[in-house]
Image (cartoon, rainbow, N blue to C red):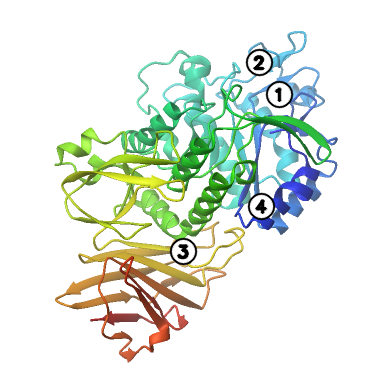
């Protein structure tokens, strides 16, 4: 978006902090560029007077940055002469997005040619050195291509970005428009490539492009993430939460001052905004974005604002669970978000409902609201077993289809009997520098189950660079046991101790609660008769020793 360093530093981040809303990554769209806002290759110093200082400030606040790029360059760009020289004169005219070119002076790249590829990647170097963390390749409208046979242009150029980013972040990836080269040039005329889109899953966080801001788009996205995950193995999929286009005509618009700049902005209806943010909380990547319009909680009415703040914090608190699923996806290929038929392939209803509900891991069933209204009823199919509402504690019998009513404060999310969901216990401003010292295990009673917690330092992985904790829940007669194993493995920055809180849903009044055989005093646990939730707080404990909590 058309943000400046002053906007981020003086207005936007302070507002996130004062409102208690977490923020991890600043995603800056194409307007930051000079000398052309579409095809430029440096930060506009009128907006970012000290680029390195801005990136250093971001890092000090626990933030990462990604910048938008389009694969083209103008002849009037100060870096064009060097790029053309590196490409040995092979850059060709033509193919910029409408309105981006001046006097037909646009040039694009063939990424298959080593000289042109080097010229293209060299254009990123200055901003890399200034401190940008990773790149957003917004390949939609330019005629850059790859003539390399046997691989899609997306897979090829995204791998180049991943290699470059891996050298700076420790892990290589790129935020890239889904199948951008297919939109731009039909995979450069190649047909029936053996790799298809599947090679992209190794390197790419896919975003689904400039979507419309409508209920229909939200409904489509509910089915898109699990469907694409199952079809291509693409675990890391992200949408513009709130949609990107078609904002004109939606209810409410205003002009406001922000960092000294006046902008006309457009709002979604409050209910659509709140429901889209809820959906984003249970997606692989949660990214608020639009075409110069309002997507921040405090830009909406009270109910929508509080709903958005609640679910953005829930999303941040879910990072331990989501990160564990991401490691599983990387290791096994099983995606984070899964169609219902992937978990229940023998159930006919799992195929019929695949477009309206999905699994977030194997234990959490999500059925986002996709219809207007501050209070709406959603039809939910429950697979075999018992299911507990994550927000209310109400239980549902499996093998049934039932209507679930929610207001903007909640959404249809259910945990399978025996399911275990690890989350942060307390809200944090950002994940990057917030040690995981307090963890809550939300457990649905009604059956036994197991889960795990994966941790690393965020940049490296593998033996000696990560840690795992095994967690089990067992019911036997009237005895309930939660076993937290000793953490196996280690990594730089790993916490030495942790306080565990158990939130066991759908249970009965406990008569005795123990931790490692020691009877816990009444103030260490609480049973809520209305929600039927037992909350047990275990004394802080070294992560390298096991904990067993039992109750009758």
**Residue 432 x, y percent position in the rendering:** 59, 59
Kindly identify which residue carries mark 3: 455
Q: Earlier in the sequence, mark 1 or mark 4?
A: 4
Q: Rate crowding at label 2 as few (under 14), some (14 to 19) or many (20 or more) other CA atoms within 10 Å.
A: many
Dot 2: element: loop
Residues under labels 3 and 1: Cα distance?
Answer: 39 Å
Residues under labels 1 and 4: Cα distance?
Answer: 31 Å
Residues under labels 3 and 2: Cα distance?
Answer: 43 Å
Residue 96: image tag? 2
Q: From where the camera sits, is residue 90 visible?
A: no
Res 433 → quadrant:
bottom right
Kindly identify which residue carries mark 4: 16
Kindly identify which residue carries mark 1: 39
Do callouts 2 and 1 mark residues in contact (Cβ within 8 Å)? Answer: yes
Indicate left or right for 347 with 138 as reference: left
Which label sits in the foreground, 1 or 4?
4
Query: Compared with residue 538, is residue 351 higher up or lower down, i.e. above or below?
Result: above
For the point 76% across and 54% down, which residue is it?
57
**Residue 333 x, y percent position in the rendering:** 34, 46
């Amino acid at each position: 978006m058309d943000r400046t360093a002053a906007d981020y530093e003086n207005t936007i981040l302070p507002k996130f902090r004062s409102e208690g809303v977490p923020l991890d990554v600043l995603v800056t769209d194409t307007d930051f560029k000079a000398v052309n806002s579409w095809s430029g290759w440096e930060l506009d110093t009128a907006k970012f007077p000290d680029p390195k200082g801005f990136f250093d400030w971001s890092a000090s606040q626990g933030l990462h940055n990604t910048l938008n790029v389009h694969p083209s360059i103008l002849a009037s760009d100060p870096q064009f002469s060097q790029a053309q020289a590196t490409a040995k004169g092979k850059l060709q005219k033509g193919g910029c997005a409408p309105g981006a070119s001046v006097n037909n002076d646009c040039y694009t790249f063939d990424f298959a040619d080593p000289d042109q590829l080097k010229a293209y990647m060299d254009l990123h170097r200055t901003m890399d050195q200034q401190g940008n963390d990773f790149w957003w390749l917004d390949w939609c409208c330019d005629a850059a291509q790859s003539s390399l046979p046997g691989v899609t242009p997306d897979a090829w150029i995204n791998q180049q970005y991943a290699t470059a980013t891996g050298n700076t972040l420790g892990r290589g990836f790129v935020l890239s428009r889904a199948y951008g080269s297919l939109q731009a040039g039909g995979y450069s005329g190649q047909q029936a490539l053996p790799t298809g889109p599947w090679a992209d899953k190794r390197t790419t966080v896919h975003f689904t492009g400039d979507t419309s801001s409508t209920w229909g788009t939200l409904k489509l996205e509910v089915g898109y993430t699990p469907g694409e995950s199952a079809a291509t193995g693409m675990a890391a999929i992200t949408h513009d939460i709130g949609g990107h286009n078609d904002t004109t005509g939606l209810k409410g618009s205003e002009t406001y001052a922000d960092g000294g700049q006046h902008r006309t902005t457009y709002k979604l209806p409050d209910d659509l905004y709140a429901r889209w943010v809820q959906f984003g909380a249970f997606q692989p990547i949660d990214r608020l974005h639009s075409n110069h319009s309002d997507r921040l909680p405090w830009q909406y009415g009270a109910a929508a604002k509080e709903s958005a703040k609640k679910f953005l914090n829930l999303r941040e608190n879910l990072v331990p669970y989501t990160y564990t699923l991401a490691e599983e996806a990387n290791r096994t290929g099983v995606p984070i978000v899964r169609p219902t038929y992937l978990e229940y392939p023998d159930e006919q209803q799992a195929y019929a409902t695949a477009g309206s509900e999905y699994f977030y891991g194997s234990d959490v069933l999500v059925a986002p609201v996709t219809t207007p209204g501050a209070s709406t009823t959603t039809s939910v199919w429950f697979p075999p077993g018992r299911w507990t509402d994550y927000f209310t504690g109400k239980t549902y019998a499996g093998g049934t289809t039932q209507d679930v009513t929610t207001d903007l404060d909640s959404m249809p999310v259910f945990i399978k009997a025996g399911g275990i969901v690890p989350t942060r216990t307390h809200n944090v401003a950002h994940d990057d520098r917030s040690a995981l010292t307090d963890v809550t295990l939300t457990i649905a009673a009604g059956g036994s189950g197991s889960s795990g917690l994966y941790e690393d330092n965020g940049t490296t992985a593998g033996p000696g660079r990560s840690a795992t904790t095994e967690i089990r829940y067992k019911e036997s007669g009237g005895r309930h046991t939660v076993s937290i194993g000793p953490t196996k493995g280690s990594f730089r920055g790993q916490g030495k101790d942790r306080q565990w809180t158990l939130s066991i849903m759908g249970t009965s009044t406990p008569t005795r609660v123990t931790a490692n055989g020691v009877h816990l005093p009444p103030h260490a646990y609480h049973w809520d008769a209305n929600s039927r939730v037992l909350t047990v707080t275990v004394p802080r404990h070294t992560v390298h020793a096991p904990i067993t909590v039992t109750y009758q």
